[in-house]
Image: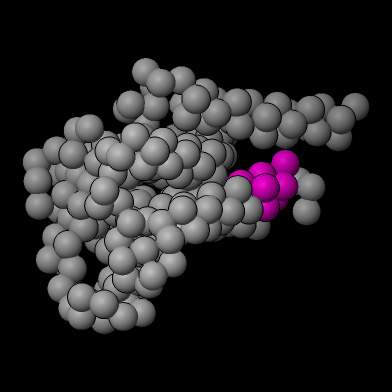
Amino acid sequence: SMPSELLTHEVLITWGTALAAFLAVALHGIWRITRNVITIAHEGGHALVAVLTGRRLSGIKLHSDTSGLTVSRGKPRGPGMVLTALAGYIAPSLLGFGAAVLITNEQIQLMLWISIGFLAAMLIMIRNVFGVLSIIVTGGVFFFVSFYATPEVRDTAAYVFAWFLLLGGVRPVWELQVKRWRRQAPRSDADQLAWLTGVPALGWVTLFGLVSAAALVGGGALLLGRW
C-alpha cells in the first residue's frame, strides 16, 4: 500500500499548494499583500535585463500600493531599452516556470538559494524604506524555509511559491489592461513599448498575456507531473 499512499500524498501537496496559491492571487484582500512579491519579481526583471543589456542601474523603488519603479541609464531607445521594458510583466511567470523546472528536478534547495541571491542583489539597489522592508521580509521567509524548516515544509513552501509566481504572473496583465481601458495607466510598460517600437500597446499586453499563460500551462504541467 506504500506507493499508493505516497502517490496520494504527492497529489495532495501538488493540488493543495496550487489551491493555496490560487487563493493568494484570487482573493482581493490577500492579493493586496501578496502582490508585493509579484512587484519584487517585476522590478527585478526590469533591473536584471537592464544590467544584462549594458544599461546602468540607478535604483529600484517598491511602494506600499504594490507599484514599483526601476530607473536605469543608457540609450533612451534601442533594443536594450525595449528588452528592459518588456521584462517586467513576464518576469514573475518566467521565474515561476524556472522554479517549476528546478522543483521537478529535485533542486528545491538550489531554487531557494537562487531566490535569496536575487533578493540580496535587489536589496543593494532599493532606494526607499518600504522597498527595503518588503525585500527583507520576503528574504527572511526564504532564509527561514531554506535553513530551519523541515524538508516537508520546505518542499510545500517551494511548491506554493512556484504556483504563486505562475498564477500571480497572469493577474497583473489583466489589471494593466483594465487600467488602460479606464485611461489610468498612460505610462505603463506596454505604452512605453508602443512608443519605443511603434507596435500598439495592446499588442504588447497580448504578448505579456500569452507568455504568462504559456508559463502557467507549462509550469503547471511540470508541477502536476504531466511532463
- Identity of the residue drawn at 39% across and 70% down: 198
- Identity of the residue drawn at 86% across and 34% down: 3
Q: Is residue 82 visible?
A: yes
Counting from the top left corner in percent of width and height, residue 190 is at: 37, 56
- Residue 107 picture quarter: bottom right
Question: Is residue 176 found left or right of 47 in the rendered image?
Answer: right
Examine the rendered structure and indicate whether residue 184 appears above or below residue 205.
above
**Main SS of the magenta segment?**
helix
Examine the rendered structure and indicate whether residue 190 appears above or below residue 28.
below
Foreground residue, 139 or 94? 94
Based on the picture, tell me whether residue 221 belongs to the magenta stretch: yes
Q: Which residues are magenta?
A: 216-224
Examine the rendered structure and indicate whether residue 178 appears above or below residue 41.
above
Foreground residue, 219 or 113? 219
Based on the picture, tell me whether residue 186 belongs to the magenta stretch: no
- Identity of the residue drawn at 37% across and 18% down: 29
Foreground residue, 67 or 122? 67
Report the number of discs: 0
Counting from the top left corner in percent of width and height, residue 60 is at: 18, 55
Picture colour scheme:
one colour
- State the quadrant of the N terminus: top right
Examine the rendered structure and indicate whether residue 82 appears above or below residue 90.
below
Counting from the top left corner in percent of width and height, residue 27 is at: 46, 20
Counting from the top left corner in percent of width and height, residue 149 is at: 44, 35
